[in-house]
Amino acid sequence: MVKAFALLAAFVTLACAKPHVARDMLLHDRRDAAPRGFVKSGPAPADSEIKLRLALKQTDIEGLQSALIDVSTPKSANYGNHLSKEEVEEYVAPKAESVDAVNAWLSENGLTAATLSPAGDWLGFTTTVSKANELFDADFSTFTHTATGVSSIRTLEYSIPAVLKGHLDLVHPTTSFSTPKQSKNVISLPVKVSNITEDASSSCSSSITPACVQSLYGIPTTLATQTNNQLAVAGFIDQYANSADLKTFLKDFRKDLPSTNTFTLQTLDGGSNPQSSSQAGVEADLDVQYTVGLASGVPTVFVSVGDSYQDGDLEGFLDIVNYLLAESTVPTVMTTSYGENESDMSIDLAVKLCNAYAQLGARGTSVLFASGDGGVSGSQSQDCDTFVPTFPSGCPYLTSVGATTGVNPETAASLSAGGFSNYFGVPDWQSDAVSGYLDQLGDTNSGLYNASGRGYPDVAALGQSVEIVYQGKTTGVDGTSCASPMFASVVALLNDKLIAAGQSPLGFLNPFLYSTGASALNDITDGNNPGCNTDGFSATEGWDPVTGLGSPNFAALLEAVGL
Ligand SMILES: *[C@@H]1O[C@H](CO)[C@@H](O)[C@H](O)[C@H]1NC(C)=O
Ligand SMILES: *[C@@H]1O[C@H](CO)[C@@H](O)[C@H](O)[C@H]1NC(C)=O
Ligand SMILES: *[C@@H]1O[C@H](CO)[C@@H](O)[C@H](O)[C@H]1NC(C)=O
């Protein structure tokens, strides 16, 4: 029903789209219809305000990508020589001629823009719908997200002046749609919350505690020693990390840690972290408890992104990266348990965000994301005809973390989102792993996924029946949300040892993981990730799109990094 309606609405939109005016304009982006779940509900009021962002062409993004691979590949002579803030900005800042062309066009139109990123590659200005339609030959309309009734102003196509070709990469928000807050594009809010009685915690087969994770992966319990090492936990959508819940969690599950262990706070976009128990967020509590509670003694910061986004409905995803890139020292690890369906985002925008993660990687941050909780059906389970890739897991410049269950044996969790991107091709470092898997797969699921896409997740960790303390009570949660902080803690502890030995932190992990690191992971070979009325993919020997290369083995990883 919904689908037919959406198609009909799209047809009407196209039929009514106004003819191109006689200025020298070039069609820049278009989509046939709004993503499933959205319908066009009418024109946007002509005098409504709209905040637009312009992405200027970066001087040499391919150069940055090559530099990233160079400093992240173990056999490279430059391995570990991460780039400075200035070096990264030299690659991504727009050329003077691009800045001049865009500024001249802005002033011809009586507009001035603010700079939104440290390298000056993002500009923003506010205008009205009618002016925006005129500037970009667009048809900004009101689209309603059917499930929540929330509406947003978008256009299915837009053009840019020919004089800006090669200077302006994209205008946002235009053709990207973001699922509204209430149901939110939070992929990884734990799918299930169940009550766990405290005495169940004695067995790792019924529920997972820090002690279970430490024993399964051989994670040291001793305190980290390096103060210039930092694990960042990203927080969005008013999910607040509660210090009292963390304190109770540590008292119950990490009696050996000093009771003073906690996290520090950074905020942007009007973010905050109020501490009343009723405001504690289950996702944020989980994320700080399985970082502070596992990465023993690693300085941990909760970065709370508020609702005053500067990135136009990316809900702070780009803002947090630009915020961190503006710092002279970036965190060595960042874990994020939020995300959305890849198809909600325009490809141009997805590429821009992905390149922002590449910048963090080049500076030396290991960027980790939960892969999603809907198996092959995407961020959360839902009806689907073809498999639904998640974002940002399809971005090749980050490490996507899937979920496992059980300790004896550890198998794939059926919720673990995995598959292949429709937007990003297979990167070099992954091509053997993916072709090996596809050879074994044969015709299974053919036509349901993109065999030339980047495969995800890259790795996995426990994500079922994980005990946390939430609003004062012990609770069990499920989701790749659990797995990403756990894997991030392992990386943070490896970095502690590397820094202590006078070496660089690991930075962008994938070229290492898919080469010398692969045999240092526990290969998960059982289980699958059903969805879209199929059994999904199966975990197999080697990489698979359910558990990636596997879960961490700390001692083996330490050896693989040369310690
Ligand atoms: C993902 O896309 C599907 C349709 O393909 C939609 O039903 C679902 O609501 C979307 N989920 C999120 C969290 O955006
Ligand atoms: C958990 O227990 C609380 C009361 O302590 C109850 O309100 C809630 O419904 C229970 N949740 C589940 C999933 O059983
Ligand atoms: C499949 O992935 C490739 C590589 O990213 C891409 O070029 C192609 O458009 C994708 N196909 C579909 C149907 O999305």
Image (cartoon, rainbow, N blue to C red):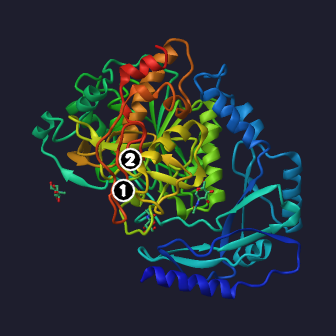
Residue 381 against residue 317 in the figure, above or below: below
Q: What residue appears at the point 78 percent right and 51 percent down from the top-left corner?
A: 57
Position of 215 with respect to 50 (left or right) is left
User: Which corner quadrant of the image does residue 75 belong to?
Assistant: top right
Furthest toward the left, the residue is 199
Q: Secondary structure at mark 1?
A: loop
Q: Which residue is mark 1?
A: 536
Q: Which residue is mark 2?
A: 546
* C-alpha gap between disc 2 and disc 1: 9 Å
Q: Nearer the viewer, residue 47 or 105?
A: 105
Could you tell me residue 521's position as x and y percent?
A: 39, 29
Position of 335 with respect to 284 (left or right) is right
Any mark on residue 403, and which? none
Q: What residue appears at the point 26 percent right and 55 percent down from the top-left corner?
A: 192
Could you tell me residue 242's position as x and y percent?
A: 34, 43
Q: Secondary structure at mark 2?
A: loop
Could you tell me residue 226's position as x and y percent?
A: 47, 18
Could you tell me residue 407's position as x and y percent?
A: 23, 35
Q: Are marks 2 and 1 in contact (CB under 8 Å)?
A: yes
Mark 2 or 1, nearer chain start? 1
Q: What residue appears at the point 24 percent right and 53 percent down from the top-left corner?
A: 193
